[in-house]
Image (cartoon, grey):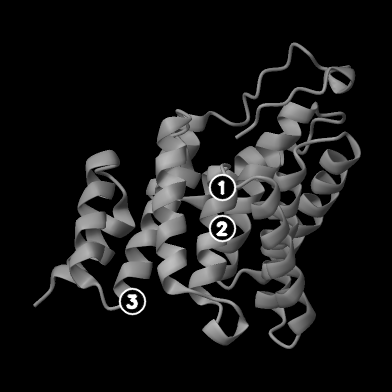
């Protein structure tokens, strides 16, 4: 997912570890829907005056997962606060030559968040889709790109280029890519893609496949509280 190093930017803090982001701790917090842990880690990261590219990549990826969680909680002010930070960080990554496809993915998400804050802002929708399509053309084997492409294809009406069949193919492809590239350990993006696929199967009327996918999720992460205590019981309820 991140195969690049920008040596010229590893200037000021080469010995600072990403202590703010203990991936195992962040992953467990994600499984328990405890975004306060993420908020604390992000706020600590924001105290680094001149983060390296590697640090910025970490920060942006967690912002990418944190903002929609706060939007789901209707905590708009907190979402806006971190959106401003994420926008600055994505701009910096672009300036320093970071992965172009990932830049597009993060920009697409910012457009999606903007739309969620203002449903009348239809221009954000078209910009979001445009970014995802460009990212997919550039990097069709990046699991995060493929996963977001699946989300876009699933929820976009067919008349505007959406396809539920193609979306499910993208989710399956994304999971395979995560696994082939050894990007599954303590990776919230991986397990989130699994959940997105289960929900897509359910919405597509394929309940048994949704149940099977939930079982796979719980094999990978048995303490994923939402799936274990809410979603899987709902699917299996007679």
Residue located beneath label 3 in the image? 204
Residue located beneath label 2 in the image? 148
Mark 3: few, some, or many residues within 10 Å (few <14, many ≥20)?
A: some
Mark 1: few, some, or many residues within 10 Å (few <14, many ≥20)?
A: many
How far is disc 2 from disc 1 in space, using C-alphas? 6 Å
- Outermost residue to the top: 15
Instruction: Find residue 132 and report its horizontal and vertical position in percent.
Output: 67, 60
What residue is rendered at 24% in x and 43% in y?
Answer: 222
Mark 2: few, some, or many residues within 10 Å (few <14, many ≥20)?
A: many
Locate residue 8 relative to residue 144 in the image: left or right.
right
Q: Considering the numbered disc 1 on the image, is that residue within a helix, a strand or a loop? A: helix
How far is disc 3 from disc 2 in space, using C-alphas? 18 Å
Instruction: Find residue 15 and report its horizontal and vertical position in percent.
Output: 74, 11
Locate residue 178 relative to residue 113 in the image: left or right.
left
Q: Considering the numbered disc 2 on the image, is that residue within a helix, a strand or a loop? A: helix
What residue is rendered at 20% in x and 57% in y?
Answer: 212
What residue is rendered at 58% in x and 42% in y?
Answer: 142
Instruction: Find residue 75 and report its horizontal and vertical position in percent.
Output: 61, 69
- CB within 8 Å, label 2 to label 1: yes
What residue is rendered at 46% in x and 66% in y?
Answer: 166
Q: In which quarter of the image is the N terminus?
A: top right
Residue 144's mark?
A: 1
Q: In the image shown, does 238 or 40 lie closer to the viewer?
A: 238
Locate residue 100 relative to residue 234 in the image: left or right.
right
Above or below, 57 against 167 in this view is above
Above or below, 200 against 38 in this view is below
Q: Quadrant of the C terminus?
A: bottom left
Circle nearer the N terminus (3, 2) = 2
Q: In the image shown, does 196 or 33 lie closer to the viewer?
A: 196
């Amino acid at each position: 997912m991140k195969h690049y190093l920008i040596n010229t930017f590893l200037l000021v803090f080469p010995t600072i570890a990403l202590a703010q982001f203990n991936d195992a701790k962040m992953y467990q917090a994600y499984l328990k829907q405890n975004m306060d842990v993420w908020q604390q880690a992000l706020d600590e990261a924001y105290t680094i005056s001149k983060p390296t590219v590697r640090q910025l990549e970490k920060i942006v990826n967690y912002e990418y997962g944190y903002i929609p969680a706060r939007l789901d909680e209707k905590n708009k002010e907190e979402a806006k606060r971190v959106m401003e930070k994420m926008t600055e960080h994505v701009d910096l990554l672009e300036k320093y030559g970071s992965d172009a496809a990932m830049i597009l993915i993060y920009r697409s998400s910012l457009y999606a968040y903007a739309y969620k804050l203002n449903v009348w802002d239809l221009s954000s929708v078209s910009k979001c889709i445009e970014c995802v399509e460009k990212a997919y053309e550039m990097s069709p084997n990046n699991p995060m790109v493929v996963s977001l492409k699946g989300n876009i294809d699933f929820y976009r009406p067919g008349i505007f280029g959406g396809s539920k069949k193609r979306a499910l193919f993208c989710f399956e492809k994304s999971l395979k890519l995560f696994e082939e590239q050894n990007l599954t350990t303590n990776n919230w993006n991986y397990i989130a893609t699994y959940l997105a696929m289960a929900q897509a199967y359910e919405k597509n009327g394929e309940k048994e496949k949704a149940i099977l996918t939930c079982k796979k999720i719980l094999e990978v992460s048995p303490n994923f509280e939402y799936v274990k205590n809410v979603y899987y019981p709902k699917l299996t309820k007679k």
